[in-house]
Structure formats: structure tokens, C-alpha cells
Image (cartoon, rainbow, N blue to C red):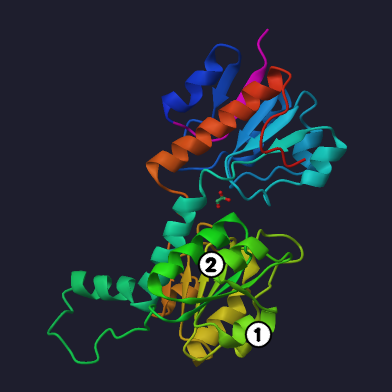
Amino acid sequence: MKPIVYITRKLPAEAVTPLQDQFEVRMWESESEAVPRTVLLEEAAKADALWTVITDTVDDELLAAAPQLKIVANMAVGYNNIDTTAAQERGVIVTNTPGVLTETTADLTFALLLATARRLGEAEQELRAGKWTSWTPMGYTGMDVSGATLGIIGMGRIGEAVARRSKGFDMRVLYHNRSRKPKAEAEFGFEYAELDKLLQEADFVVTLTPFTPETAGLIGTRELALMKKTAILINSSRGGVVDETALYEALKNGTIWAAGLDVFETEPVPVDHPLLSLPNVTALPHIGSASVKTRLAMMNLNAQAILDFFEGQEPKNRVV
Ligand code: GLV
């Protein structure tokens, strides 16, 4: 009998081909809807390997219900959807897909920064709604990106890639991170800053930390109050890093100027979410890594992790 791999989302056939010979591959049949919890629990109970995406919660309840499970391959760089402590305790290994999505996610983050600064979403919506009546001297005026100060919170691979892009815009870069990055400081002139100093000096604050108990609500009322009135917050990491209620108040009251969000505390974000009522919010549906090439590369890494594991090799990108 072949080991069973359960894939929690419908994938292109080519992504699954490498697994077909050696595994019984089962897959949730919808691309646009997450697998219901009850189905996930039933399938996990029979699976030797799980191929998960960020909308799946892999917690102790699931792991307890999956006695055969040996590996969870999460098709994302972030793995806050997985209880890694519980996995470790139950001897289940977890892998993720870093590296291949770095540049694509940095592109999107920078695109969101530019779009928010120059009000692209708002301007396009008005054009499509027939509200473009004339060129106006102060219409749709935004904030300059060129020459501004960029503050990056979370200087991992993606943080560094965003910072590198900013050199093309002559930006000063401040970063805050658990560890210093002497190589990037020497090579590109990025400056380490304590969090409060970064918040006070940056024109653009970009959050790129993993979502952990330490980073939950990292940007709240106090942090927003430290930012410039003209500052823009960009979040393309996880929604929970920013306190959305505090952000709504800050944007509404003019504590900061605007926000660009690719991620939300609850996803999909409800259309009646207060943040979506604000014109100074540019909102995207969690598309940081969404290029054709990158998504296929992430699928390839996930398949390889499962193949390696069952061939007795240590999978690359093991988290626990
Ligand atoms: C997406 O959000 C990822 O973590 O890869």
C-alpha cells in the first residue's frame, strides 16, 4: 500500500505529478474554498502526509486525530497556522517554502507601498465610476516615495529584498530586527534602529515579521501615535501583527496618513470591515507571493519535501 498524501486545496495537475507514482494522492476538490474542518479531520486521520495552505489550522486536535501522520508540508513561508510545538511533541515534522517567494513578495510589498502613497486604488475606482471630471491641481495628490525614509520592521529575507528595492528610489532605510544585519548595513547602508526611533522617523513603516505571540499586536495605539502624521503603514506579513481597531482609529483621526494592507486579522476580510470604509486604505487579498512562477515553485518545494522525507532524506526547509 502506498502512503497517503492529502492536499488541502485543488492544485494544477502538474504540481501533483511528482507525487503520483509513490503516493496515493488525495486532494480537496475546490481551488477557491478552504477544506471544511470536518473533512480535514477525516482526511488527516488516514494520511501519512498533509500538504497544507495558510487557511488550514493544524493544531493538537488535528494531530491527535492523525495517528499515521508523519509530515506537514505547508505551502507558505509563514507557518503560524501550525502548532509546531504540538507537532514536535507528536513527532510530526513540519516544512515551509521560503526563498522562492522572497522577490515576488518584495515586489508586491513595494507595489503596495507605491499604490498607497500615490492613491492608485482610490484613483482607479473613481475613474471607473465615471468620477474623473477634469485634471485638478490638488486632486489625488499623495506622498513622495523617492527620497523618503523607509522603516522596515522584520529584516528577514523579504525585509532585505524590500529594502534593496528602495535604493532605486534613493530612500534612507531604517530597520528593526531581533538581530543586526552587519552585511546589509555595510553593503547598502541600511541603519539599525530601535522600534520607537524607527516609528518616529520613517515615512513608510513596513511590517514584515513572522506572526508569533511576541509580534501579535506589535503595532497598536502607542506605536501609531509615535508615527508621523504623514506616515504610511504597509503590512504584507500577517494581519495580527497590527491592531486593526487601533489602526482604524489612527487612520480616521489623522494620526497617520494612510495604510496599505495585503493581510488582515480575519481572512477573507469581511466587506463591511471598518478599515474598508476608509479611502486612505489600500487593501489587497493576501497576494504577496502570487506570481505564476513563484506559486509553481512553492508547489515544487512542497512536493520535494514530501518525496525527500519518504525517501529517508532530511527535507530542506524543515521548521521542526
Ligand atoms: C504567505 O503569506 C506566506 O507565508 O507564504
Which residue is label 1 attached to? Answer: 197
Give yes or no for contact between labels 2 and 1 (Cβ–Cβ under 8 Å).
no
Let me know if residue 228 appears in the view. yes
Between disc 2 and disc 1, whose residue precedes? 2
Which residue is label 2 attached to? Answer: 188
Point 63% across, 29% down: residue: 305
Where are the magenta residues, as a range? 1-11
Point 67% across, 65% down: residue: 182
Q: x and y percent of residue 42 in the render?
A: 68, 29
Mark 1: amino acid: Lys
Q: Please tell me in which quadrant of the rendered image residue 137 appears.
A: bottom left
Q: x and y percent of residue 70 in the render?
A: 75, 27
Mark 2–mark 1 Cα distance, whole angstroms, equals 20 Å
Q: x and y percent of residue 252 in the render?
A: 49, 87
Q: x and y percent of residue 38 in the render?
A: 65, 37
> Residue 9 lies in magenta, yes or no?
yes
Secondary structure, mark 1, is helix
Please tell me which residue lies in front, 142 or 287: 142
Callout 1 crowding tier (Cα within 10 Å): few <14, some 14–19, many ≥20:
some
Q: Horizontally, is 185 left or right of 287 in the view?
A: right
Secondary structure, mark 2, is helix
Q: Looking at the rendering, in which quadrant would you find the N terminus?
A: top right
> Residue 166 lies in magenta, yes or no?
no
183 relative to 195, above or below = above
Please tell me which residue lies in front, 93 or 166: 166
